[in-house]
Every structure is written in C-alpha cells, then in structure tokens.
Image (cartoon, helix red, strand yellow):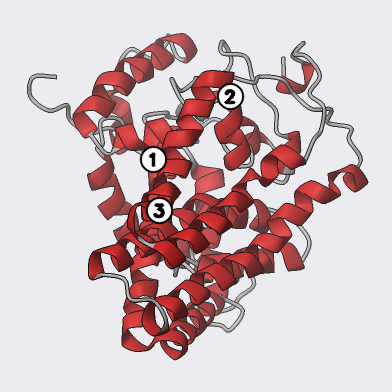
C-alpha cells in the first residue's frame, strides 16, 4: 500500500501556514538593530519554539490530494521563489550594517552571523533543495543562487547524482553509517563531498565523450557563483565582511549536514543476488510527521515520499504509516540537537536501527556483510 492509498484523513491545502518561515526576516532585522538578548531569538525560534509547538499541536499524518492541479500550488511555489532575493538582502544587508553602521561587540557580531547561518541553513538550503529538484530551468537556478550564498553549490550535484541513486549504500557520502557519530560524519562529508560530486559529473560528461574539465561541467558554474558571492561580500564589507560571510556559510552547511545525518542514519539497502542493491524504498528514510516543524521545513521531514517521488512539490508530499516507514521520535529540531551528542544519539537511535533491521530484513542474520555502512561499536556499548 502506498502513502497515496493510505486511508488518512484528507488534508486541506493551505499555503499560509508554510509562510511562517518568513518570520525569520524580522528576527534578523531586530537582532541587527538591537543586539543583546534579541540575537538569541533566531536560534530559539528555529529550535526551541518549533519544538514547543510540535509538542503542543502534535503530529499531522494527514495527506493532501495528489490530483491537486498545478495552478492551486501557486502560493506554495511563490514562497520558494521570493526567498532567494529576501535572503540576499538579509545576508548582505546584515554584513553592511555590521561593518558600517552598528557598534556591536565582537561577541554580538558573531552571534548575529550565527543567527544568519541558522537562517540560510534552516530555510535557504531547504528551499534550494526544493527548487533544484524541479524540471524547469529557472527554479533550479534560484536554488543554485541560494547555495552560492553558503558556498555549497556542489550539493546540487552530490544530492541529485549521488545521494538519490545511492542512498543507503557506501557510495553515498550523505548516508550516515550505523554508529557513526555526527562529528566524524561531518568531517567525512566535508572531505568527500566535492570529489564525489566531481566524479559524478565527470561520468555524465564521459557518456557524451566529453572531458571532465569541459565547460558544460556544472562544477564550474558552482565555482563561479560562489566566487561572485564572496566578491560581493568583500565589496559590501571588506575583509571583515568576507570573514563574516564565510562564517555564516559554515554554520549553514553545519545545519544542512545535521539534517542529512538524521535523515538516513544506519538505514541500509539490501544486496541482491545480482550484485546490486535493491531499489530505493520508503523504509530507507526516517520520517517525522510533526506538524509545525514540517511547516518550517516545507515538509522535508516527509522524507520517504521525497525519495520515492523526488520532483513532487513539497505541499503534496505524503506521510506513510509507522509500519511502513521508520519514524523519528521528534521533529528535526530536537533530533539534530541530539545528534550533536553522539552517546545520547546512539542510545536513542541504535536500538531503533536494530529494530528496523528485524522488521524489514528478518532474513539477514549477519550484518557484517554491510561493513561499508557500519562502524565498530565503542567499548561498553
């Protein structure tokens, strides 16, 4: 039974709740103008308030009608379109204000740019992900511009050509291995992500008898856009502005990779007798149907359906019953915070991974064959 066939109550399509993400903008402006304790409102909003509201309103497993015509999705699409120019104004406007206008302390400046990084990571990269999955020309371009503002353009290639086809296998850098702590995972992804994306694009070009260095390799585009974003930061704020820009980009990437870590931790696709992995299925992603955090993250937590239907627009993503898809205990704000504490993460998630193995692969008794997605347990575990 697919999610679309699941007898869940009908979910009315309302775009307005998803627009809560725009409230990051006044929080950033307030932090820049006032400084002090107002700086804490940005991370509190993204992590604390969303968690409190998730707890208050609970899960929302209802599904929208998949037959909804494209014209009825305009206000959902508009939200993702306008974020790119809004983010550019917030980012470069903040850099200009911090280097020319305000008189904040060094600690306040670092705090404000941390908040900007939380915003460009929690909202900007999530919106970029929605945009570059679309099949027209201009929406992926908006996604490229958003990724340029966090110096992570290669993520589009790595996600589309590596993560989606190879999720749950050792080939995918973004699949967190069983028992792999986030900090080790983060360093591995930073090290392996760009080379992996380059190899994927080189293989695509080779099929057309073109060299990897050909101008059609989009890696050059990512490099140029990233360089332009850096140059603009220097023009706006000089060397200090450039440093602030790089700092927020690092925070944004950290936010992204925390999310990637949570989405597939320990989930492995089965080897088939043919020597290949089984096709991607819904149970190869961790899902969360916590309603408010899904509004903030435009349904990214309905991740199983995204992997089954990558081009499906976010308001139409479906939830699956718990017996079909493994469920996280909380929304991403709590789970990503937990991931920063590896012993706590393993204590909560490792038993769930082992239960997942028994549920979906009871015939596999020796998981040592999947060493490419395993790490030895620490002593005492």
Q: Is residue 173 visible?
A: no
Please give the label number shown on residue 261.
1
At which x and y percent is residue 270? Answer: 46, 26
- Proximity of marks 1 and 3: CB atoms separated by less than 8 Å: no
SS at circle 1: helix
Query: In front here: 146 or 15?
Result: 15
SS at circle 2: loop
SS at circle 3: helix
Marks 2 and 1 sit apart, C-alpha to C-alpha, by 18 Å
User: Nearer the viewer's eye, disc 2 or disc 1?
Assistant: 2
Circle 2 crowding by C-alpha within 10 Å: few under 14, some 14–19, many from 20: many
At which x and y percent is residue 294? Answer: 59, 34
Please give the label number shown on residue 38.
3
Q: Quadrant of residue 356?
A: top left
- Residue at 54% x, 61% y: name it: 157
Considering only vertical position in the picture, is 280 above or below 171?
above
Q: Quadrant of residue 207?
A: bottom right
- Residue at 17% x, 30% y: name it: 376
Q: Quadrant of the N terminus?
A: top right
93 relative to 320 in the view: left or right? left
């Amino acid at each position: 039974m697919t999610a679309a066939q699941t007898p869940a109550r009908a979910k009315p399509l309302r775009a307005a709740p998803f627009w809560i993400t725009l409230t990051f903008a006044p929080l950033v402006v307030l932090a820049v103008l006032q400084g002090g304790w107002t700086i804490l409102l940005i991370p509190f909003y993204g992590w604390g308030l969303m968690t409190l509201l998730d707890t208050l309103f609970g899960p929302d497993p209802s599904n929208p009608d998949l037959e909804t015509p494209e014209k009825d999705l305009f206000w959902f699409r508009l939200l993702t379109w306008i974020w790119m120019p809004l983010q550019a104004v917030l980012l470069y406007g903040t850099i200009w204000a911090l280097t020319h206008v305000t008189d904040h302390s060094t600690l306040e400046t670092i705090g404000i740019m941390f908040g900007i990084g939380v915003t460009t990571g929690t909202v900007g990269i999530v919106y970029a992900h929605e945009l570059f999955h679309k099949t027209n020309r201009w929406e992926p371009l908006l996604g490229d511009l958003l990724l340029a503002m966090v110096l992570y353009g290669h993520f589009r290639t790595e996600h589309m050509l590596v993560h989606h086809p190879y999720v749950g296998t050792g080939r995918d850098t973004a699949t967190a291995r069983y028992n792999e702590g986030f900090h080790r995972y983060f360093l591995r992804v930073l090290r392996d992500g760009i080379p992996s994306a380059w190899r994927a694009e080189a293989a695509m070009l080779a099929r057309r008898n073109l060299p990897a260095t050909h101008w059609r390799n989009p890696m050059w585009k990512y490099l140029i856009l990233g360089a332009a974003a850096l140059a603009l930061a220097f023009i706006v704020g000089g060397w200090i502005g450039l440093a602030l820009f790089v700092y927020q980009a690092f925070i944004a990437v950290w936010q992204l990779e925390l999310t990637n870590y949570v989405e597939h931790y320990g989930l492995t696709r089965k080897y088939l007798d043919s020597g290949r992995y089984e096709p991607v299925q819904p149970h190869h992603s961790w899902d969360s149907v916590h309603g408010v955090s899904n509004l903030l993250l435009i349904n990214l937590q309905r991740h199983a359906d995204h992997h089954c239907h990558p081009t499906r627009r976010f308001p139409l993503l479906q939830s699956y019953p718990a017996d079909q898809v493994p469920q996280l205990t909380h929304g991403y704000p709590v789970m990503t915070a937990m991931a920063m504490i590896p012993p706590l993460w393993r204590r909560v998630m490792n038993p769930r991974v082992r239960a997942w193995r028994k549920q979906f692969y009871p015939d596999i008794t020796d998981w040592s064959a999947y060493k490419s997605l395993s790490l030895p347990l620490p002593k005492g575990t």
